[in-house]
Image (tube, rainbow, N blue to C red):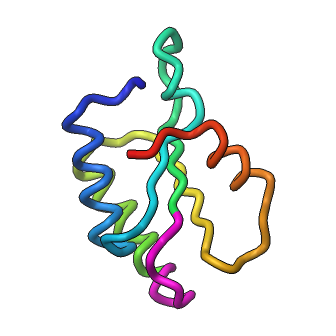
Amino acid sequence: MRLSEAQVCSITHILRQHFGAESEIRLFGSRLDDSARGGDIDLYIEPELTDGNELAKALIQSKVALVKALGDQKIDLVINRKGSSSLPIYQHARETGVVL
């Protein structure tokens, strides 16, 4: 995994602060490959929040907080609301991702 322990702590703290303490967070994509270079930070979230307006607010606020904590990096947040339809990206992130 190409994230430091401090980065992982920042990510989990920020995302749980905005999406709920019981939210599931996974890192997936190129940052899992230790031999690769660069790449964005792909994060999968199953949030504790369920209200669409609250989720939209949490998305914006968490992105701002992540940029402040990690610097100006490309960060993709994939949010899978409980009870929503299953998209292929959700399945891929759950199968290949690492729980943070």
- The C terminus lies in quadrant: top left
3 to the left or right of 31 = left
10 to the left or right of 55 = left
58, above or below 27, in the image = below
38, above or below 66, in the image = above
The reply to whether the magenta stretch includes residue 52 is yes
Closer to the camera in the image, 59 or 68 = 59
The reply to whether the magenta stretch includes residue 44 is no
> Looking at the image, how many numbered discs can be counted on the residues?
0
Residue 47 in the image: x percent, y percent? 48, 71
Residue with the most extreme left position? 6
Question: Which span of residues is magenta-colored?
Answer: 46-55
76, above or below 49, in the image = above
Residue 96 in the image: x percent, y percent? 63, 36
- The N terminus lies in quadrant: top left
Residue 97 in which image quadrant: top right
Query: Residue visible at 79% across and 60% down?
Result: 87
Query: Residue visible at 36% across and 65% down?
Result: 62
Query: Residue visible at 27% across and 70% down?
Result: 17
Residue 48 in which image quadrant: bottom left
Residue with the most extreme top position? 35
Query: Residue visible at 48% across and 22% down?
Result: 38
Closer to the camera in the image, 45 or 69 = 45
Residue 6 in the image: x percent, y percent? 19, 37
Residue 76 in the image: x percent, y percent? 54, 50
45 to the left or right of 57 = right
